[in-house]
Structures are given as structure tokens and as C-alpha cells.
């Protein structure tokens, strides 16, 4: 990743989604982590994590090169709080080395930080029921 | 570390219980105090309402004397922000008997400068969009 990403999140959920997708697909935890508040809760790796454990888990996962595509489905916003509902698909590699595709719907909570910038506070991906 | 915000989570769950009590009392002003000033409610899928429209909608709904029950399925709580997944039912008495509404909500709460939790996004149908 030689090209620097602009990680500023505007009020536009589609722009936010593009930034998240680009940061995720950079494969670099240090980049993706900048989108999260230091005390954020993330469920992206299948466990509910915060702090250094959250950073470590997502960094290890992104290092495996998963590729994310995502589409914003709903957004609800107040002055300082936003709920996003996003459909996502992640192409990754399973433990045995075979390609895997994970589809689901993620609920994201963003809040404004002390500088008025949007930042991720809580994410909650739910995998699609394969029998649905 | 995994997440262990026990005290904050207790506060948020207490808020949810207070909400149910206020809701079932039918007191619209009491219920409204459990929302942030600019809260968004999505009682109809994909149609958020806020401000005076939200307050009026809530008062009108409560006038039917609905009875809510909830079960908190998931809670994620940090210092000033919480996400809840809530399985709920509401029974509304009608001349033809009880009308039941139900869903799994995904709600966002914020903690104000006064330390009180309030609903910021009231999204009763959650990710069923």
C-alpha cells in the first residue's frame, strides 16, 4: 500500500462506506484501526473485543488479505450519533486454505469525536443464515 | 481484552427496563424523557421520524395503551454509547381483541453529560429492512 488513504469520514454514509472498504482492503490493521475510537467494541473477527485485543485480532485478520465489498442499506442519524445498516460480502481463505465467501448484514454505530469527526464506536456483523 | 463493562451495562439494562415501565404506564412525557432531544425513531421500516413528529407519534401510539415486553438479546456498551438487540412484543387492546406487534430491535443509546442514558436511535425492526 504505497498510496495514502484519506480516512476522513464525512456525513455521507456512502463516502464512509467507501473509506471503510478501502481501509479494510488495504490489508493493514494500522490503517483500518484509525477508523475506530480507542474504546470501540468490534465483533468483526467473530468475538466481542475492545482495546488492544480488538486491534490485534483485526490486524491479524486483515493481514490474510480478505476482500470486502459492502452496500449501505439504511442510515439513521442524530446530531452526534449514526446507525448504519450495511450488507457485506468478504472473500477470504478458510483455515484449510480453501477460498470462503462470508455474506452478512452489519450494524455500525458511529459517533462524533471531540473534534466533531465521525468515528466507529460499535460494529455488529451478523452472518447470513445459509438456510434462509 | 474482551469486553467487561459490567457497571455501564447494568445502567443501560436499567434504562431499558425504565423505558418499558414508562411505556406501559402510558405517560408520553415520561417516555420522551428517555430519548435524546434529537432522537430518531423508525416505527415504520425505512421511515425515520424525529422532533415534534416523533413526539406526536409516540403520544398517539401510547394513547392506545399498548403493553410492551422485552428481552435483551445482546448488549454492547462503552463509556457513552450502547447498542442493544432487543426482542420485543407489544399487545394493543382493540375492540376485536388484542393486536400483537413484534420484532427484534437494534437500538442505540447515548450517555449524556448528566450521566443519564437515553435512546438516540429507536429502531424496532432492527436489520429487518
Image (cartoon, rainbow, N blue to C red):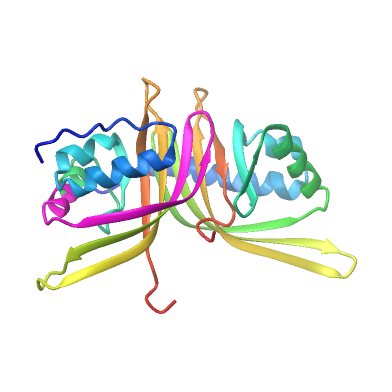
Is residue A23 at all visible to an observer of this figure?
yes
Q: Residue furthest top?
A: A115
Left or right of B54: which side holds B16? left
Say above or below: B120 vs A60: above
Which quarter of the image is occupied by the C terminus of chain A?
Answer: bottom left
Residue A14, image x, y percentages: 41, 42
* Residue A29 percent location from the top left of the image: 16, 43
Residue furthest to the front: A3
* Image position of B28 (left or right of A15): right
Locate the N terminus of chain A and report the quarter of the image it occupies.
Answer: top left
Span shown in magenta: A57-85
Residue lying at 78% horizontally and 48% vertically, measured from the top left: B62
At a point 36% along the width and 48% down the height, the residue shown is A123
Q: Is residue A3 above or below residue B126?
A: above
Q: Is residue A3 magenta?
A: no
Residue in the image at 68% along x and 56% along y: B68
In front of the other: B54 or B7: B54
Magenta stretch contains residue A75: yes
Q: Position of residue B44 (x, y in %)?
A: 66, 53
Is residue A11 or residue A121 the one in the foreground? Answer: A11
Question: Residue drawn at (27%, 59%), measured in percent from left and top?
Answer: A46
Task: Depth check: give the residue in front, A102 or A59.
Answer: A102
Residue A116: quadrant of the picture: top left
Amino acid at each position: 500500500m504505497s498510496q495514502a488513504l484519506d480516512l476522513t469520514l464525512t456525513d455521507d454514509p456512502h463516502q464512509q462506506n467507501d473509506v471503510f472498504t478501502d481501509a479494510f482492503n488495504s490489508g493493514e490493521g494500522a490503517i483500518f484501526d484509525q477508523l475506530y475510537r480507542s474504546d470501540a467494541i468490534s465483533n468483526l473477527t467473530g468475538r466481542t473485543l475492545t482495546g488492544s485485543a480488538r486491534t490485534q485480532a483485526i490486524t491479524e485478520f486483515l493481514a490474510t488479505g480478505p476482500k470486502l465489498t459492502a452496500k449501505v442499506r439504511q442510515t439513521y442519524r442524530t446530531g452526534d450519533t449514526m446507525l448504519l445498516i450495511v450488507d457485506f460480502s468478504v472473500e477470504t481463505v478458510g483455515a484449510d486454505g480453501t477460498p470462503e465467501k462470508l455474506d452478512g448484514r452489519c450494524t455500525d454505530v458511529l459517533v462524533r469525536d471531540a473534534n466533531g469527526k465521525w468515528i466507529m464506536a460499535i460494529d455488529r456483523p451478523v452472518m447470513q443464515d445459509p438456510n434462509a | 481484552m474482551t469486553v467487561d463493562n459490567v457497571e455501564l451495562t447494568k445502567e443501560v439494562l436499567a434504562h431499558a427496563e425504565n423505558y418499558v415501565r414508562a411505556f406501559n404506564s402510558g405517560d408520553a412525557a415520561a417516555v420522551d424523557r428517555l430519548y435524546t432531544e434529537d432522537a430518531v425513531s423508525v416505527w415504520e421500516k425505512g421511515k425515520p421520524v424525529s422532533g415534534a413528529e416523533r413526539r406526536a407519534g409516540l403520544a398517539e401510539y401510547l394513547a392506545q395503551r399498548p403493553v410492551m415486553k422485552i428481552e435483551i438479546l445482546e448488549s454492547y456498551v462503552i463509556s457513552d454509547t450502547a447498542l442493544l438487540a432487543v426482542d420485543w412484543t407489544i399487545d394493543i387492546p382493540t375492540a376485536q381483541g388484542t393486536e400483537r406487534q413484534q420484532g427484534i430491535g437494534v437500538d442505540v443509546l447515548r450517555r449524556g453529560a448528566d450521566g443519564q442514558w437515553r435512546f438516540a436511535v429507536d429502531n424496532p425492526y432492527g436489520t429487518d429492512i
